Amino acid sequence: MNENIFIGLDIGTTKVCAIVASVAANDEINILGIGKSKSDGLTRGVITHIDKTIASITAAIHDAEAQSGVKIQSVVAGIAGDHVQSFQSRGVIAISGAEQEITQGDVNRLIEDTKKIALPSDRKILHVIPQEFIVDGQDGVYDPVGMSGVRMEATVHIITGLVSAAQNILKCVQRSGVQVSDIVLEPIASSDAVLDTEEKEVGVALIDIGGGTTDLAVFEDRTIRHTAVIGIAGSKVTDDVRRGLGVLTAQAEELKIKYGHTHMSSIADNDPITIPGIGGRDPLTIDKKLLCQIIQPRMEEILEIAALEIKRSGYQKHLSAGVVLTGGGSLVKGTADLAREVLGMPVKIGIPRGFRGGFVREIENPMYATGVGLVLHAIKNRSRGVTTNVAESNKKMSGSAKSILDRMKGWFDEL
């Protein structure tokens, strides 16, 4: 495959999306193809049916190949799910060098010290993200290498997850005839696609409302400060419509997308909506306000849980750029207005931008934020000379948990 071709594979709860992009000599990014298929094998972001997931991945990849004319051999895949958890930890070491100068080895030793925490046997530390270092009581140090001191402390952000979730993603992609070149945490990918560097610096929260999970990432000083994955998202809204109106799931999804509204006071025209009857029954007529009464409470619940997570992060008052909403769930009309009321801060819809050619207009949609972010992650690693070869690692280590975790170590290198 051309070394300037990059493919992102977003394996979501409601859709699987493969995005093919190329990088020109002047570093302009062109979108060559978008492959999309319905996803049936996931529940709340985690694979629960191997064969259905393989079929969805295969269909999306074939669609992307047909549109782009590129034979896909390897992809950058995303991982999410409510099994991902994060928390803060601290560590402390003494500096024992001859001149008591801090070296990279001392930093690595300190990071290892912060990992000495009790975890269940089925969970592993995916990565440790340093927040700040404290040298001899002096805080606010972000790069202590070369400084002098006798005692060094660190505050870190630890992210954990189930190893089996990553193993299942690798298994499904490889059985689809494609190799995995890297695995990326999906909230990080989405942030690459829709957040500006300035927003990350002054403080911003990203809320990605997908089909099965709502992903949250809080940034300040260009560093990720808090992550969370909430197991309630767009598919729950669709399920509420299905149960509330007694319609089919496909009809409920169509009603949500075409006529759905999450903010009652923003509805301008309360036009009647006619729904075909099931099994020869008479058609059902409802109005937009009735539909909003079903949708709004669930969207409020999602945003209130996100607000609690932002508060738990301790950075609620540091988010000068407010909140950026993205993901397919943010497309329901009135979501931004509702979020402003619930969260009490500025809100905007995040759309992937910065592309020059190809399917530029098609890609400027919040539902493609994760897929585009996975491509950007691959391009960023290429430009830094970072190379990952998951296929070779699998051959050598037979897909062991160690090889998976080793690949996850590079998720946050850019932060």
Image: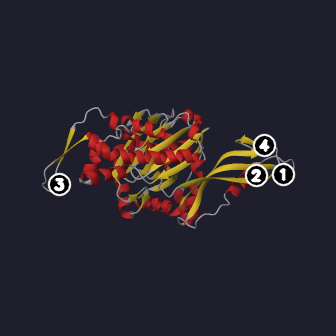
Q: Which residue is mark 2?
A: 106
Q: Nearer the viewer, residue 208 or 369?
A: 208
> What amino acid is at disc 1?
Gly
- Asked whether the beta carbons under mark 2 and mark 1 sit within 8 Å of each other, the answer is yes
Q: Which residue is mark 4?
A: 146
Q: Nearer the viewer, residue 269 or 226?
A: 269
**Residue 356, picture quadrant:** top left
Comes first in the chain, label 2 or label 3: 2
Q: Position of residue 198 (x, y in %)?
A: 56, 32
> What amino acid is at disc 3?
Ile
Q: Position of residue 44 (x, y in %)?
A: 42, 56
Against 398, is 2 above or below? Answer: above
Query: Which secondary structure lies at badge 4?
Result: loop
Q: Nearer the viewer, residue 101 or 68?
A: 101
> What amino acid is at disc 2?
Asp
Q: Which residue is mark 1?
A: 97
Q: Position of residue 351 (x, y in %)?
A: 43, 37
Comes first in the chain, label 4 or label 1: 1
Query: Which secondary structure lies at badge 3?
Result: loop
**Residue 43, picture quadrant:** bottom left
Q: Residues within 10 Å of mark 2 (few under 14, many from 20)?
A: some
Tell me, yes or no, if residue 293 can be seen here. Answer: yes
Distance of mark 1 from mark 3, alpha carbons? 77 Å
Q: Which mark is residue 278?
A: 3
- Asked whether the beta carbons under mark 2 and mark 3 sit within 8 Å of each other, the answer is no
- Residue at 39% across, 58% down: 42
Against 110, is 351 above or below? Answer: above
Query: Which secondary structure lies at badge 2?
Result: helix
Distance of mark 4 from mark 2, alpha carbons? 11 Å
Comes first in the chain, label 3 or label 4: 4
- Asked whether the beta carbons under mark 1 and mark 3 sit within 8 Å of each other, the answer is no
Q: Looking at the image, which residue sits at the far right?
A: 98
